Image (cartoon, rainbow, N blue to C red):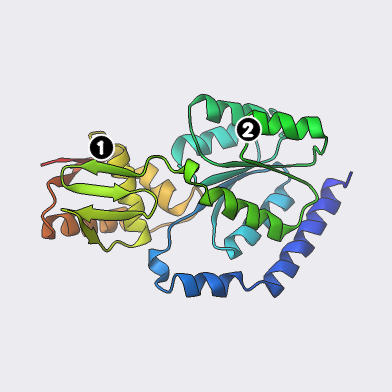
Amino acid sequence: MLTQALLAAKCEKDVATWQAHSHYDSQRKNLCPQTDRKPIVRLLVIEDNTELAQLLANGLNAAGFEVDSAATAEDARSALMTTRYSSIVLDLGLPDADGLSILQEIRGKKDPVPVLILTARSAASDRIKGLRSGADDYLVKPFAFEELVARLEAILRRPSQLVGSSMKLGNLVFDTASRQAFINEEPQYLSSREAAVLELLIRRKGHVVSKRLIEDELFGLFNEIASNAIEVYIHRLRKQLLEHGATVKIHTVRGVGYLLAEV
């Protein structure tokens, strides 16, 4: 088995090689020429080897993902409480708990978020246990970085991971697959972050969504943001809803957050 240092060194070389020879970014731009409308695909990487975690974050960021990292089970639980992720990359050998306990907690809550186990445990019995515990995929270290990206793309494409096909409030419909909003069946143009805010609000329709939760969803746990960034997105959404005759309204609950409800 490779030591942690050797594994990190191999990953660093693999990521550098992949970035140098991959045409991924140019292909992505060709598919999505309006880059502001690309869906935000946020990953949580749960990995206790800080060097490897940083290399994974750098490589996955270059591949078009936005990445948060957690080094312990406690950190992972805190991140999962405040942010909704598109997928999770999960190491099993965490310092304070077995990674499978995190997976079992996620599935115990009926959360369908895709989970890819990335671990040095290579025995068939370990792979079977991981998959039967609810993992969507299982990749053994050492690994080819390009394969990790391809596997993440594959599990994110699976229709079974969509949390319903659409959500409706009044004459507003939000399609979770295309991340497209409709008012009176007319499609609305929204930037990726405006769509992300609207999705959070309509998922929790009738309930207050804290400003902090919206910030974490849009910008991650560790990125600095402008103090009025969320207010700007809320203002744009309110204008869009009003101008297109929506029968719903975004209410401000001062000092707490925002609430989407029918007029």
Quick one: 142 or 226, which is closer to the camera? Answer: 142
Instruction: State the residue lying farthest toward the front.
Output: 159
Disc 2: which residue: 73
- Distance between mark 2 and mark 1 Cα atoms: 30 Å
* 2 or 1: tag closer to the N-terminus: 2
Horizontal side of 73 relative to 238 (left or right) equals right
- Secondary structure state at the residue bearing disc 1: loop
Question: In the rendering, which numbered label is found on residue 205?
Answer: 1
Residue 192 appears anywhere in the view: yes
Residue 240 screen position, x and y as percent: 18, 59
Residue depicted at 83% across the width and 35% down the height: 123
Q: Residues within 10 Å of mark 2 (few under 14, many from 20)?
A: many
Residue 99 appears anywhere in the view: no
Quick one: 154 or 247, which is closer to the camera? Answer: 154
**Quadrant location, the N terminus:** top right
Assess whether mark 1 and mark 2 are in contact (beta carbons under 8 angstroms).
no
Position above or below: 233 against 44? below
